Image (cartoon, grey):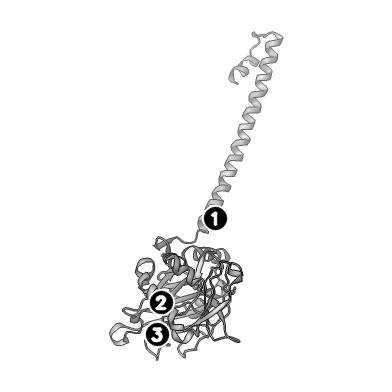
Amino acid sequence: GLWLKRQRKSKATRLPQGHRLLVTTAAVAVRCSFGLQRRLKRSFTHQTARFGEIADTAAMRDWYSCKPILPHFGAEVHGFSLDGDDPLDPDLVQRIKDDMKSYRVLVFKSQKLRGERQVQISQQLGEIESTFYKHPRSPHPDIFRVSNDETEGCVGVGRTGWHIDGTFQDRPFKYQTMYMQSVCEGGETWFIPLKEFFEMQTAETRQRWDRYWMLTGRGEGGLAHPLVYRHPVREDTSLMFHCGRPFCEGWGVDDESPNAEQRRLVQILPPQVVQDELSKCLDAAVDQIGIKMKWEEGDFAINDNLGNCHYAAPGTQNSRQTAGLRILHRTTISGETVPSKPDG
């Protein structure tokens, strides 16, 4: 380019016509190349800035990070507050639901939630369904207040046995939220992921359980839930049961036809037969695949009620005078599907 400029200024240099044509063509190509470079540079600068904005937005919408509790199950969230007055951002709600599908239990640490805020968050996860006794100390009609002191909340909750909440309904609860306003020594809640629990049983046990139906005796005309069914969100194997004596009327047993659609009821077992078997297996499994959640004050947990079973450890009813006061605020989110076999 500099050489061409010098040649234009020089009167002494004359090139043959062919050479002048080649030089002129080269000059045009160089000018076009420089112009293209300038345009590409401006475009690249603009796109870089735009990608930076997108990256910043993506980073802002990452919201929080999960710390797994076990490699296959459960996660904690630190350094992220759910408090506030406005509803949660819809993208954040979707992120929570996605993480629930992956982890099945999420514990947001060090929260400070009013009763109204817990209900507001619960309403964004689904429709709240309150089927429990309203304790006078509850901060909201949709919050079930649980305690080890009957003057502070309902006592003995979750102590009848391993269970899924809402088995007395045709659509058991999808989620629970649990806010630990106050904790006591020994006041653990135990969780077991049902997919892994089922898979660790022998082939004979899995085949036998697949033919059981839990009879609740509740609801209009009573209900029968398949013990083994497909999780409606994760689409893996899950279980539906309650090991508390008052919550089960018995167990229907199908015949052994290899075609599930052709099976017919052939027997009714007393409730304790299957409840005791499940309880024994679950007690043995909790230390292998489950979580004995040692709550801390301010923990806010969301539980996949259809993917896990849970149990309130004996220490949840320790004396307030010796172990401290335990207060748990719980909401329950309506189920959206009827537990069904893969064939419907």
| Distance between the alpha carbons at the discs numbered 1 and 3 | 42 Å
Residue at (58%, 48%) from the top-left corner? 50
Q: Tell me the quarter of the image containing the N terminus.
A: top right
Amino acid identity at mark 2: Glu
N-terminal of the pair, mark 1 or mark 3, is 1
**What kind of element bears circle 3?**
strand
Q: Work out whether residue 32 or residue 184 is closer to the camera in this orientation and state it.
A: 184
Res. 197 image quadrant: bottom left
Residue at (71%, 10%) from the top-left corner? 17
Contact flag, marks 3 and 2 (Cβ < 8 Å): no
Residue position marked by numbered label 2 in the rendering: 277
* Disc ID at residue 147: 3
Res. 34 image quadrant: top right
Location of residue 56 in the rendering, given as x and y in whole percent from the top left corner: 52, 53
Location of residue 141 in the rendering, given as x and y in whole percent from the top left corner: 52, 86
Amino acid identity at mark 3: Ser
Residue at (28%, 85%) from the top-left corner? 322
